[in-house]
Amino acid sequence: MKAQNDIRVTIRADKDLKEQAESLFKRMGLNMSTAINMFLRKAVDESAIPFQVSVKPPGIGYSLSADDISAVFTSAVREDIANYKIKGRPIKKLAFIRIDFGLNRRYGS
């Protein structure tokens, strides 16, 4: 049923892009009209182009806490330190590296 304030909006889009978008939205349980309305509402609410809605699994920075990111960073630095030791390169202490990157403070406190 059409809402009283609904109007028809016509846009031009590449045929392949439209079909790919419809396929994506269908996997998300949406139709094109609902997806576009979601975009418009979010853009108006944020006064900006909104964040990406995706069926892709979240990556670093999306689902990891500050502690998780710190742990990943620390692990990568430890691996680099081990590689530097093998190659005989000078090594900066992990504690100083953490300070350089602002990881010496506790987040959320």
Image: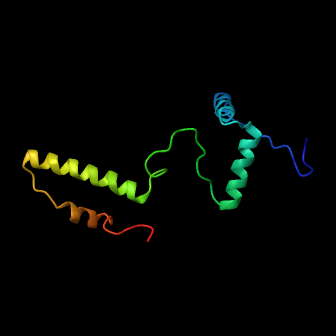
In the displayed structure, 95 sits above or below 36; it is: below
In the displayed structure, 105 sits above or below 15; it is: below
Q: Return the x and y of residue 1 as percentages of the image width and height.
A: 91, 41
The one nearer the camera, 89 or 85, is: 85
The quarter of the image holding the C terminus is: bottom left
The answer to whether residue 11 is seen in the rendering is no
Q: Residue at x 68, y 55 (%)?
A: 42
The one nearer the camera, 11 or 74, is: 74
In the displayed structure, 50 sits above or below 21; it is: below
Q: Is residue 96 left or right of residue 24?
A: left
Residue sitting farthest toward the front? 109
Which of the 4 quarters of the picture holds residue 44?
bottom right
Q: Return the x and y of residue 103 as percentages of the image width and height.
A: 32, 64
In this rendering, the count of numbered labels is 0
Q: Is residue 64 left or right of residue 37?
A: left
The one nearer the camera, 105 or 47, is: 105
Which of the 4 quarters of the picture holds residue 106?
bottom left
Q: Return the x and y of residue 3 as percentages of the image width and height.
A: 90, 48
Q: Residue at x 65, y 61 (%)?
A: 46
Q: Return the x and y of residue 81 as percentages of the image width and height.
A: 17, 51
Q: Residue at x 59, y 52 (%)?
A: 51
